Amino acid sequence: MKATMIYAAGDIRVENIPDATIKNPTDAVVRVVRSCICGSDLWPYGSKPADSAPNTIGHEFLGVVEDIGADVTGLKKGDLVVSPFTWSDNTCDFCAEGLQTSCRHGGSWNAGDVTGCQAEAVRVPQADGTLVKLPVAEDSALLASLLTLSDVYCTGHHCAVSAGVTAGQTVTVIGDGAVGLSAVLAAKQLGAEQIILMGRHRARTDLGRAFGATDIVAERGDEGVQRVRELTGGDGTHAVLECVGLSPAVDTAFDVVRDGGVVSRVGAPQYTEAQAGFGVFLRNITFTGGVAPARNYIEDLMPAILDGTVEPGKVFDSTLALDDIADGYQAMADRKALKVLITD
């Protein structure tokens, strides 16, 4: 089968690898119908050493169940399913607490003998716990939005939920990438009254307005902080959703959050320390967030997609075939595409 391999920074290839097959009785094999490129995929795309071993890549997909192991009881061949970006049994104590990313029997794609999802097919461990059936046909117009349940919409939602966003609050979202825009959409769905999106790419911030942003702040640094403060009567916002992953964004978050507020971060942080010093302590700021347990949110978020209330699939502004995926990586790295959808 065809699968995407990353050899080094900027070196993405589609190659043939052994077909996905059942290895354990809890496995399923899924034929990939839609996958995509994540912003976090761009980190290895920009930094993987040339002397490291090539590996598969990709962690977001939906598709059709082609085969199941002997112990799989909740799925059958032909089911259309979506997968979160980690796999889990959904039965252990961590899963029961809604933390499937810490599943005692779970894991990640592209690790060990589990390959990546930018491919023609995927072996899914712990299939009963991982995969969620979709009540639509394989050619549904909703597939793009349903694919966002694999990662990006759930990640934006997790950021907002972790910040405790509730009706009537003020929220700042830092970052106009797909996760930031998803966080805007999530904050709107949770009832935020004022949503300030900090971003400077017009096409993206226009989509942010469509998703629910009430104000756009294009300025960065001290000017951006001043503008947010002006928009909030000098106080800052109750919650700040940091969706960039770089330390200057965290600094800005602490500067624009209201005293007693919450800074929530998601995505893949590219720093080891955050400057949450004595000044932040004196203001009673909560710093939270983390990797999104997407499996915990999929079934709650799906109904609004199915009835058309939300359309998170609008974050996809480019569609390519699997054979052309290298072009998608380059387009996203060059900021010519927001998020690239990959078809079978």
Image: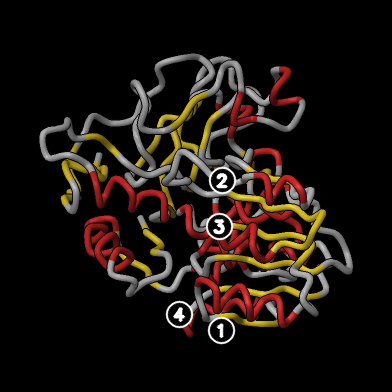
Observer-side mark, 1 or 2, equals: 1
Kind of residue indicated by mark 1: Asp
Q: What residue do we see at 28% from left, 59% from top?
A: 329
Q: Callout 2: helix, strand or loop?
A: strand
First of labels 4, 1 by sequence position: 4
Q: Callout 1: helix, strand or loop?
A: helix
Q: Are marks 2 and 3 in contact (CB under 8 Å)?
A: no
- Is disc 2 surrounded by few (<14), some (14 to 19) or many (20+) residues within 10 Å? many
Q: Are marks 4 and 1 in contact (CB under 8 Å)?
A: no
Which residue is the site of mark 4? 201
On residue 251, which mark appears? Answer: 3
- Is disc 1 surrounded by few (<14), some (14 to 19) or many (20+) residues within 10 Å? some
Q: Callout 4: helix, strand or loop?
A: loop
First of labels 2, 3 by sequence position: 2
Question: Where does residue 326 sit, x and y in percent of width and height?
Answer: 22, 58
Kind of residue indicated by mark 2: Val
Pick the front one: 143 or 57: 57
Asked if 137 appears above or below 3 in the picture, the reply is: below
Which residue is the site of mark 2? 82
Asked if 61 appears above or below 303 in the picture, the reply is: above
Pick the front one: 296 or 280: 280
Q: Is residue 80 visible?
A: no
Question: Where does residue 249 sit, x and y in percent of width and height?
Answer: 52, 59
